[in-house]
Amino acid sequence: MARMIEVEDLRVDFRHDGRTVYAVQGVSFAVDDGESFGIVGESGSGKSTVLKAIAGLVPSESRALLVNGRPSAQRRAKADRRQMQFVFQDPYASLHPRQTADQTLREPLIIHGLDRRDERIAAALEEVGLKPEHRFRYPHQLSGGQRQRVAIARALILRPPVLLLDEPTSALDVSVQAEILNLIAGIKKANKLTTILVSHDLGVVAHLCSRIAIMQAGKLVEVVTAQELRSGDAREDYTRRLVAASRGFTRA
């Protein structure tokens, strides 16, 4: 199977209070076309920073960072941005408070010069389970789950082959988390997307991802399959401790 994403020796560091913080240290992995890949770890492990580096949202260094076989530059071209879209953790913070759902979805279509905008917007809202009356509402007029649906629709409206998801349900009420996870799973399957999902919840990644990278202190500990994560059958002690510390992490 063809590789969609290849990361080799990825490094991210920044200055904080006069010292250098090595947020990501020599991380390497590959994701196949159409695969669902997860990244888990404790807070501060560097998992979200890896995702943002792949998206070009934070400065990074690497021996290789390829998307669909093409090297990704630090300053991504418009065509590169269209290939890969990002869904952030907090849907309220990621949506402009003074833009309706219609304006939020229209903006990327204008930037990329796509036509049939009204038709595309209506279809995107329907795809994420929102009704026509939600189209002209502002973020404060929507629930948390509805806001995240708008954010997912914004990511999908350009029809990218790659979707990057950073803790997409952690800011939502427990009652709607399963709905959003099932929505993501259905959209991924219907559109044959390659996805990378970052989460601290082992149950989420075991449910949605076929392989999972375990991060600790900026380093990749190992990559395991979902079945290995469920059973605790991992090579590294840290992974086994992480599984043991997680209670009720398997989900139907």
Image: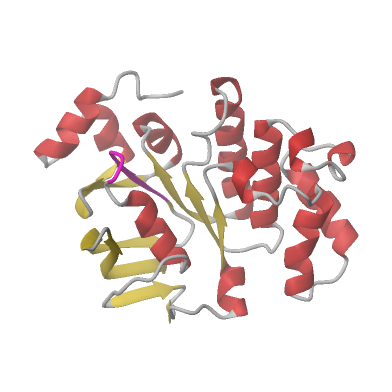
Q: Residue at 23% across / 54% down in the picture? A: 218
Residue 177 visible in the displayed image: yes
Report the quarter where the N terminus lies. Answer: bottom left
Towards the viewer: 3 or 133: 133
Secondary structure mostly taken by the magenta-highlighted segment of the chain: strand
Side of 67 where 149 appears, left or right: right
Residues rendered magenta in the picture:
37-44
Q: Residue at 71% across / 30% down in the picture? A: 143
Q: Residue at 85% across / 45% down in the picture? A: 135
| Above or below, 221 relative to 251 | below
Q: Residue at 30% across / 35% down in the picture? A: 227
Report if residue 227 lies within the magenta region.
no
Rendered location of residue 84, percent (x, y) = 55, 65
Residue 1 visible in the displayed image: no
Side of 71 where 85 appears, left or right: right
Rendered location of residue 178, percent (x, y) = 56, 27
Side of 24 where 171 appears, left or right: right
Side of 182 where 226 appears, left or right: left
Q: Using the rendered view, name the quadrant where residue 53 is placed.
A: bottom left
Rendered location of residue 56, percent (x, y) = 46, 69
* Color theme of the render: secondary structure
Towards the viewer: 167 or 124: 167
Q: Using the rendered view, name the quadrant where residue 126 is placed.
A: top right
Towards the viewer: 26 or 116: 26
Rendered location of residue 155, percent (x, y) = 64, 56
Report if residue 43 lies within the magenta region.
yes
Furthest residue in direction front, as rendered: 18
| Above or below, 31 relative to 90 | below
The number of discs equals 0
